[in-house]
Amino acid sequence: MSHRYDFASDNTAPAMPEVVDAFMRFNTGFCASYGDDEVCEKAADLLRELLDADAAVRFVSSGTAANALSLAALAQPHEAVIAHEHAHIVTDEAGAPGFFGAGIGLITLPGPSGKIDPSGLAGTPQKPDKARLHSPDHVHVQPAAALSITNATEYGTVYSEAEVAAIAAPVKAAGRTLHLDGARLANAAAAGFDVKCLARLGFDVVVLGGTKVGSTPTEAIMFLNRGLERRLGARMKHAGQLVSKARFLAAPWIGMLETGAWTARAAHANAMAKRLADAMPFRVAHPVQANGVFVEMDDAAHERLRQAGWHTYRFIDGSVRFMCSWVTMPETVDEMVATLRAIA
């Protein structure tokens, strides 16, 4: 049976027209290699304007590379990064942060619907193996050097500025650094999150996702902490991420940001998720604030959905995930709802 992947992931969608147009616009003539070109600089300027931050900007081809390179710049091999227990860097990157960072570890924290519970940041002297921000260094464990949050989260929820501040403040007060996995930051922005607050709150590195929002494969790493620029090019080269024709990673950002499509297309995906959630015959497991809908569905119902021709994933918490994209149409949502109602 041929399956449809409309709701399997926002990665399965094609590239938006604004990206294709920009890609073709800059596919002319000759220019410098390895990011030293006018296309990369123009894209970087637009990103700096977006975050209202004087940041060093680099482009890579995957979110895993973006996250791993970022964290390698924030932690030494004998140190660790704190993250939500279901964060992408913990569950879906095959140890890439440790590989790129020559052994950096991960300390996981719980929290509802993908959001870190701030109360879990403080460690206890009685449990040095659970070292957090304020626990004393212990010779047998990797102490926390940085904290990573994801917005929108893996469960499609969106941190508010106040929620981010409640996490960021103690991290900065403890002298640690901050990383944001923004693979779906466009969806968070479309839901009302002010991306300019990230510089105000002291984030050191921010990853902005292009691929999931509707670009060809490209992610932007913004080093808001300019002290991290030292030998950044060499670090990227060593990791196999210094792309020679970098203008083709940068050009999509010009198309998305000049036109406002980065947030406008994400807003459409968010709206389609809400449409799906409002008509969903199965119980919705997490608040629907971005472009994902997670529902409680037993294996038999999930198999009937597969037999009806729709491919969806069972997620980490056991729920079934439905992802909407920039190209998800209302009639497609209604078709899925009709199938789900027949199954339910």
Image (tube, rainbow, N blue to C red):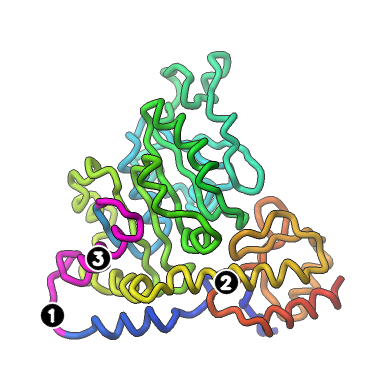
Secondary structure category for the residue under label 3: loop
- Kind of residue at disc 3: Val
Q: Is residue 281 above or below residue 200?
A: below
Q: Quadrant of residue 42?
A: bottom left
The residue wearing badge 2 is 269
Q: Mark 3–mark 2 contact, CB under 8 Å?
A: no
- Residue 83 in the image, given as x and y percentages of width and height: 51, 40
Q: Residues within 10 Å of mark 1 (few under 14, many from 20)?
A: few
Residue 293 vs 102, above or below: the answer is: below
Disc sitting over residue 243 in the figure: 3
Q: Is residue 168 magenta?
A: no
User: Which residue has dot 1 on it?
Assistant: 30
Q: Split into 4 quadrants, where in the image is the C terminus?
A: bottom right
Q: CA–CA distance between discs 3 and 1?
A: 16 Å
Q: Secondary structure at mark 2?
A: helix
Return the disc, 3 or 1, that comes first in the chain's sequence.
1
Left or right of residue 9: residue 336: right
Q: CA distance from mark 1 to mark 2?
A: 36 Å
Labels 3, 2: front one: 2
Name which residue type carries label 2.
Ala
Q: Position of residue 294 (x, y in %)?
A: 70, 60
- Observer-side mark, 3 or 1, equals 1
Disc 1 marks which amino acid?
Answer: Phe
Residue, x 41% and y 48% (percent of image)? 197
Instruction: Give the number of the mark in front: 1 or 2.
Output: 2
Residue at image point 56% right, 74% down? 268
Element type where label 1 sits in the image: loop
Q: Upstream in the sequence, badge 3 or badge 2?
A: 3
Query: Which of the marked residues, 1 or 2, is nearer the chain's N terminus?
Result: 1
**Residue range of the region highlighted in magenta in the rendering:** 29-55
Q: Quadrant of residue 253?
A: bottom left
